[in-house]
Image: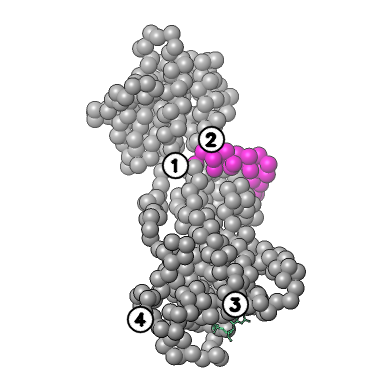
Amino acid sequence: TPTVAIVGRPNVGKSTLFNRLVGKKLALVDDRPGVTRDRREGEARLGDLEFRVVDTAGLEESTEESLLGRMRAQTEAAIGDADVILFVIDARVGILPADRPFAELVRRSGKPVILIANKAEGGAGLAGAYEAYSLGLGEPVPLSAEHGEGMADLFEALMPYFPEPGDETEDEEEEPGKPLQVAIVGRPNAGKSTLVNRMLGEERLLTGPEAGITRDSISLDWTWRGRPFKLFDTAGLRKRARVEDKLEKLSVADALRAVRFAEVVVVLLDATIPFEKQDLSIVDLVEQEGRALVIGLNKWDLVADQPGLLKELKEKAARLLPQVKGAPVVPLSGLAGSGIDNLMKAVVQVHETWNRRIPTARLNQWLAEAIETNPPPAVSGRRIKIRYMTQVKARPPHFAIFGNQLDALPKSYTRYLVNGIREAFDLPGVPIRVSLRMGK
Ligand code: GDP
């Protein structure tokens, strides 16, 4: 469940809001020593939103001189744990100098924040609510924690930051020791069987799968540098079943089966006839299925000008495959057995990238800069506002971007964001997914 922190200077009504959100349920008191000593946590419910709420109010009655210093540390800790922050001000008093250091902590965290203008019962404190704009924390939500007014508006403001029912926030985590699943896919005669047989070792090839190679119906187990892999290779399996046919077409069904099986797909090209139409459609498949990609340039032993061709093909890959920009391009020879180590290093590397999780605070710091450098355009008078982003999934990285009027956001702007994320967080060779979510 998401965690919501209530933050603000003393006496703005944080505890009252906490009690309002937690209701009759007894708040858990955290009695660990130090910074968290006075912090209260509870299970809150608002409409159908359920969350953990953390209150930083416990020190208000304290008479210690170090009150503000301790409160500051406590606030920092609460912000650190939070997914969303409720920054509370007293609407009737307006903004005081004492509000600003807390606002600054919130702003610097880069986390999503909802500005609460409290004590606004019966429409009181409108002036204070307007003043609150000057904090640069967005539009204030006026409410009265004590009288329970404005809670529906708080609900509306919080809702966009909660996962949607369809969001899988629980990924299949990487189990340690679980084999990394790799498919080797390519046009007929690209050299898939030759490569796989080389990887598995000649002696095993000669003696057949019974001796030494454990296999289930679709994949081969293999170990590289002590790490287990499962290899999927359609051509190889078919050949072992003696259905070898040199005129065979690439079967889309086979390719799809292999791609779906895999976490990382090696698209094997014949370096002497690279980037044919079929090669590109296999890459499209990898992108659509959300897998990580490595390009293998096979038959490198036949290439005369190796540095020249490598440069050329890397440029070509960047141009032809923008959807998986930066995918590793690895020259190799299955026949000669060269380049296989580099291939496997690239596989492990993109697999790590594919599993990556980027902290929300870092994403939002980046997002603020990206928007400042290049603000979203106004489209036919509609002001598009991007507020916040978070990574909702890995394998492949999937980001949700929240804001207003995002249905009008041009595709080119989404592309700008995706390219920026790829650069800033170093995510080459994996598809990047973005969903746009609108608040109400
Ligand atoms: P597949 O259809 O992708 O499984 O391709 P094969 O492994 O059957 O290879 C097709 C042809 O390319 C065979 O004649 C191989 O000997 C040849 N071949 C495969 N890999 C290499 C390589 O690295 N260098 C050279 N020179 N020939 C290769």
Residue 179 falls inside the magenta stretch:
no
Please report whichever mark, 4 or 2, sits nearer to the chain's N-terminal start.
Answer: 2
Residue 137 seen from this side = no
Taking depth in this image into account, of 309 and 9 the one nearest to the observer is 309
In the image, residue 217 sits, relative to residue 434, either above or below, namely: below
Which residue is depicted at the point 32% across and 24% down? Answer: 32
Specify the label residue 161 is tagged with: 1
Q: Amino acid at mark 3?
A: Ala
Magenta segment, which residues?
360-382
Which residue is depicted at the point 58% across and 64% down? Answer: 342
Q: Is residue 221 left or right of residue 281?
A: left
Please give the residue where the numbered disc 3 appears in the rendered image: 336
In this rendering, the label closer to the viewer, 1 or 2 = 2
Distance of mark 3 from mark 2, alpha carbons?
52 Å
Please give the residue where the numbered disc 4 appears in the rendered image: 210
Circle 3 packing at 10 Å, graded few (<14), some (14-19), many (20+), is some
> Is ligand 1 within 8 Å of the beta carbon of the residue shown at mark 4?
no
Quarter of the N terminus within the rendering: top left
Specify the label residue 110 is tagged with: 2
Q: Amino acid at mark 2?
A: Gly
Question: Which quadrant of the view contains residue 123?
Answer: top left
Q: Amino acid at mark 4?
A: Glu
> Is ligand 1 within 8 Å of the beta carbon of the residue shown at mark 2?
no
Residue 375 falls inside the magenta stretch:
yes
Percent of width and height locating residue 421 = 59, 49
Please report whichever mark, 1 or 2, sits nearer to the chain's N-terminal start.
Answer: 2
